[in-house]
Image (spheres, rainbow, N blue to C red):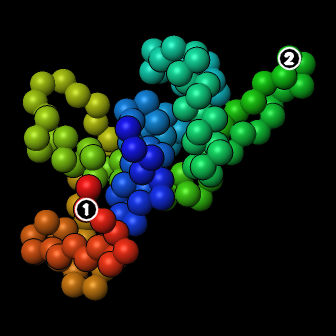
Amino acid sequence: MKDLSNQPCLIARSLALVGDAWSMLIMRDAHAGLSRFDEFRKSLGIAPTMLTSRLAALTEEGLLERRRYSERPPRDEYVLTQAGQDLLPVLFSLVAWGGKHRGGGNFTRFFDAETGSEIDPISIDRSTGAPIGTRPIQIVMPKSTTNE
């Protein structure tokens, strides 16, 4: 597959980093307070080699920071950086889409820890105040870009 990390489209650049399910689920769990390798592995049921590579990529790209919490034996934890924290609205946009198009039956729900109310996310355009998806959009690609 073509490397998307240098594309002019920010969707492509972002997907180059977090476009696989494991990375997004690791970020979900990090937002839920998990920080240790074994916690992620238990929550996700992911192979250790896959988890190691995803944690390394998320750390290298600045979404997680690796911190040593034990010297003997050496153990690290992974904590959210500001960039990682800023991914939460993206995760909740996926929750909203999934609830509308992949819901039904038993599924994970997200609640506000202070109010106890279920989170019902919407995305709003800052300049118009309109919910995203209710107004037509126009995509303008840089002139130096070729179509794929």
* Badge 1 density bin: few <14, some 14–19, many ≥20, Cα 10 Å: few
Q: What whole-number distance in Å separates the C-alpha atoms at marks 1 and 2? A: 51 Å
Q: Looking at numbered disc 2 in the image, what kind of residue is underneath it?
A: Pro
Residue 30 image position (x, y, % from top left): 53, 38
Vertical side of 69 occupied by 39: above or below: above
Residue at (21%, 84%) from the top-left corner? Answer: 128
Q: Nearer the viewer, residue 88 or 110?
A: 88
Residue 1 image position (x, y, % from top left): 38, 38
Vertical side of 37 occupied by 35: above or below: below
Vertical side of 148 occupied by 104: above or below: above
Left or right position of 145 against 100 = right
Residue at (60%, 33%) from the top-left corner? Answer: 55
Q: Nearer the viewer, mark 1 or mark 2?
A: 1
Residue at (59%, 59%) from the top-left corner? Answer: 82
Which quarter of the figure has residue 79? top right
The earlier-in-sequence mark between 1 and 2 is 2
Residue 73 is tagged as 2
Residue that extends furthest to the bottom in the rendered view of this protein: 127
Left or right position of 74 against 56 = right
Q: Looking at numbered disc 1 in the image, what kind of residue is underneath it?
A: Asn
Q: Mark 1 sits on what residue? A: 147
Residue 104 image position (x, y, % from top left): 10, 30
Residue at (46%, 36%) from the top-left corner? Answer: 23
